[in-house]
Structures are given as C-alpha cells and as structure tokens.
Amino acid sequence: MTQLNEFLEKLVGILKRKFERIDVRLTRLDERLRLLESRLTTLETKTSNVNVKEEILKELE
C-alpha cells in the first residue's frame, strides 16, 4: 500500500507540474491574442478612416 501511495503522490506531482506549464502557456497565448485583437481593431479603424477620406475626396471632385 505504501508503494501505491508513493506512486500516486509522484503521479500527482507530475500532473500538477504539467498542468502548471499548460496554464502558463495558455496565459501567454491569451496575452498574445489580446494584443492581436488590439492591433486588428487599430487596423480596422485606420482602414475605416482611409475609406472615409476617400469618400470625402470623391465628393469634393
């Protein structure tokens, strides 16, 4: 029974470390995703501004 407990404790320790690493990776991916979403929003805004400027220039011609 002691060997089984030791084995299970080691297994739990290994699994905890694995899940901690996965959690760190997911956190990093989440941060990258937020940064990309922010950049995309900025690009969409710039594109919209360019489109508006083009429309105004067409109307002025």
Image: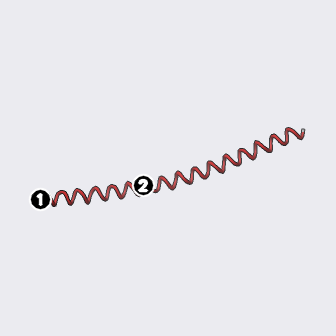
For disc 1, the marked residue is 3
What residue appears at the point 47 percent right and 56 percent down from the top-left corner?
28
Disc 1 crowd, CA 10 A, few/some/many (<14, 14-19, 20+): few
- Residue 5 image-quadrant placement: bottom left
Q: Is residue 7 above or below residue 61?
A: below
Disc 2 crowd, CA 10 A, few/some/many (<14, 14-19, 20+): few
Q: Of label 1 and label 2, which has the lower sequence position?
A: 1
What residue appears at the point 76 percent right and 45 percent down from the top-left corner?
50
Farthest residue to the right: give it: 61
For disc 2, the marked residue is 25
Q: In the rendered image, which quarter contains the C terminus? A: top right
Q: Is residue 8 above or below residue 59?
A: below
Q: CA distance from mark 1 to mark 2?
A: 33 Å
What residue appears at the point 61 percent right and 51 percent down from the top-left corner?
39
Which amino acid type corresponds to the residue marked 1 in the rendered image? Answer: Gln
Which amino acid type corresponds to the residue marked 2 in the rendered image? Answer: Arg
Give the x, y percent position of residue 56: 84, 42
Give the x, y percent position of residue 43: 66, 48
- Specify the color scheme: secondary structure
